Structures are given as C-alpha cells and as structure tokens.
Amino acid sequence: MEEKYTDLIHKAQLAYENAYAPYSNYKVGAAVLWDSGAITIGANMENASYGLTVCAERNAIAAGIGMGERQIVAIAIAVPSEDLPAPCGACRQVLREFSSDSTVLLVNGKGKIKKTNLKKLFPDSFGPEFLKKL
Ligand code: THU
C-alpha cells in the first residue's frame, strides 16, 4: 500500500479499539482524510434501542464536519475480524455528500487491504449537485 495511506489505516485500526458494540460485537473503526490534510476518526456506537446505532464511517465524517471540513479525499475502514469490511448503504450516501469519488481503503484484522473508490462502490449516485441544478 502507498505510504501516504499508512497513517490513515493505522488510525482506523486504533479507532475500532474504542468501538461501542456490545450487541453485535462487530467492531469497526474509520479514519477520514480531508482536503485540508486533517484526519478525523470514528468508531461504531450501538444503542440498546438498536435502530439508533451509528456506523464508524458516519461518526468519523461527523467529527470532520464539526471542525469545518467539507471535502473528503480518502477513508480507511478497519475491522479486527477476518472478512474485509463493506460500508453500509447509508454510509456510502453520506460519503457521497462530501466527495464525488474518494479513495476507500478496506482493512481486515490480518492487515489485508483492498483499495477501491466511491464511484465503484456507489455508482450512478444522487448527490448535492442535483439540487443545485433546480
Ligand atoms: N457498522 C459500521 O460501523 N460500519 C459499516 O460499514 C457496517 C456496519 C456497524 C454498525 C453496527 O454497530 C455493527 O457494525 C453491526 O451492524
């Protein structure tokens, strides 16, 4: 993997250690690289009222938005388990709000990395520019 992504991946791996996932036991960490160079992290946060669960990716994105960031360059998503993670549909849509085609790095517990991008994961998507053309 390109060296420019090693720190981002490491931060996503550190983030899953803080996941609050007592119900699924499925821990996820995410680290988002913004165009300013800032990196924000997040972990999944479950709730006894299950539907209130928030994914790691959206928590990492929300942390950046609160700092004034708006443009995502890349996101690393890491899990301790064997299968590579896959961002859920809701997270793909939220990523799309802040990037038309960010780099997406999927990392499993053995350090296997798959590099892909949002356009591949979420083709023909709806985004903010649709509303600007009204
Ligand atoms: N989860 C994430 O944090 N990110 C994903 O992309 C998929 C799912 C979390 C939500 C929930 O806490 C657990 O994984 C099981 O769905």
Image (cartoon, grey):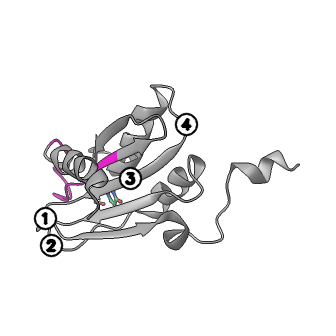
> Which residue is under mark 1?
109
Query: Could you tell me which secondary element the residue under label 3 belongs to?
Result: strand
Mark number, residue 75: 3
Residue 62: name its quadrant.
top left
Q: Residue furthest front?
A: 3
Q: In the rendered image, which quarter contains the N terminus?
A: bottom left
Q: Residues within 10 Å of mark 1 (few under 14, many from 20)?
A: some
Answer left or right for 11 relative to 103: left
The label shown at residue 82 is 2
Judge the density around disc 3: few (<14), some (14-19), many (≥20) Cα neighbours within 10 Å: many
Q: What is the spatial separation of the Cα atoms under label 1 and label 3, in whole angstroms?
A: 17 Å
Q: Secondary structure at mark 2?
A: loop
Q: Which mark is residue 70?
A: 4
Percent coordinates x, y for residue 28 in the rendering: 24, 54
- Considering depth in this image, is 130 or 75 the residue closer to the camera? 75
Nearest to the eye among marks 4 and 2: give it: 4
